[in-house]
Amino acid sequence: MSWVPPGPAMLFCPADRPGRYQKAADRADVVILDLEDAVRGEAKADARAALIDNPLDPNRTIVRVNPANTGDFRQDLQTLAETDYRVVMLAKAEAAQQVHDTGLQVIALIETPLGALSAAEIAAAPECIGMMWGAEDLTAALGGRASRFGPGEPNSGQYRQLPQHVRSTVRLAAAAHGKFAVDSVYLDIPDTAGLRNEALDAAALGYEATACIHPSQVEVIRAAYRPTDDEIEWAEKILSTAPDAHGVFRLDGQMVDAPVLRQAEAISRRAGITGGGDHA
């Protein structure tokens, strides 16, 4: 059975900082032990050794491995063979064959122009269980300067059009192939209001989780993904009525059909998984 996120807050942790492993696990729903960007080249060997020597719960741990066209990628896979971890995040994924070559369950991280153009093909790979996108690496690969509008610009703090397009593309590719989607990190740690708004938007669009870079962001993300009491009551009412209804039906003046039922199911599912519960 494919792995699914046990909650919406995924916290990155540098793999060369084993002292932080358990702290991250205690705070977040999922820990992403990072062998890629968070670890300098000269520290990657120590990071791999730390990964082996400091095991976490594999059901709540993802390992971000280096891009498939690097020697580090092959060494990462050799290291993983000595652990119980079976879910990886493939950095800078650009082709379905790269996902297949891991031999593991893969969250494909789309953060290059080629990866964005190949998102649907990657999502279709049997080994791909989920998709994520990365705004900053994407912007750098484009030769750009900023993924978001800056202070004083219209729409300050929001994504520019092209990163927003890739965010939508990844969500669509994941949904088209029945895979979950993880939203990109929010770098402005003190801006909890901005993070909350972005996480609310992600949840509304069916994202399963949002990645984060600091423990203080975890509760903001959980709260944003957690359905309100009114939403839960609405969903429960629809789902309890549906078994006795035939096709389209009317409830409290609202027409309920298959799309509305799926929305109610999504709310019920999020209410069940938020904060580390089981995925319904």
Image (spheres, grey):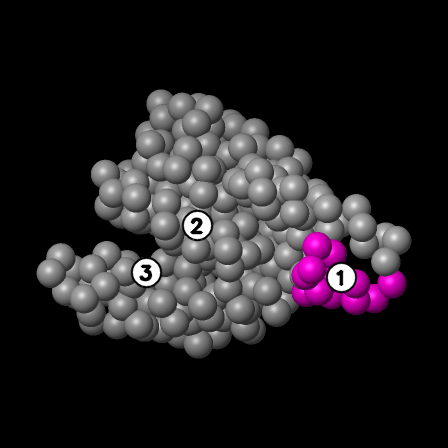
Q: Position of residue 79 (x, y in %)?
A: 49, 40
Instruction: Using residue 255 as the reference point, say whether residue 66 is left or right of it.
Output: left
Choose top left, top right, bottom left or bottom right for residue 59: top right
**Judging from the image, what secondary structure is the residue with disc 3 in?**
helix
Magenta span: 246-259
The numbered disc on residue 250 is 1
* Residue density around tag 1, few if under 14, some if 14–19, many if 20 or more, within 10 Å: few
**Judging from the image, what secondary structure is the residue with disc 2 in?**
helix
Choose top left, top right, bottom left or bottom right for residue 148: bottom left
Evaluate whether residue 269 shows in this view: no
**Judging from the image, what secondary structure is the residue with disc 1 in?**
strand
The residue at which mark 3 appears reads as 135
Do the numbered discs 1 and 3 sit on residues whose CB atoms are within 8 Å? no
Do the numbered discs 2 and 1 sit on residues whose CB atoms are within 8 Å? no
Depicted 181 relative to depicted 25: above or below: below
Closer to us: 120 or 17: 120
Instruction: Using residue 153 as the reference point, say whether residue 256 is left or right of it.
Output: right
Q: Position of residue 7 (x, y in %)?
A: 55, 39
Closer to us: 68 or 123: 123
Q: Which sits earlier in the primary sequence, circle 1 or circle 3? A: 3
Instruction: Using residue 117 as the reference point, say whether residue 243 is left or right of it.
Output: right
Closer to us: 103 or 124: 124
Residue at image coords 37%, 45% = 196
The numbered disc on residue 144 is none
Residue at image coords 44%, 50% = 200
Evaluate whether residue 24 shows in this view: yes
Q: Which sits earlier in the primary sequence, circle 2 or circle 3? A: 3
Specify the amino acid type for callout 1: Arg
Residue 113 covered by magenta stretch: no
The numbered disc on residue 200 is 2
Q: Rounded to the nearest whole Å, what is the CA distance between mark 2 and mark 3?
A: 18 Å
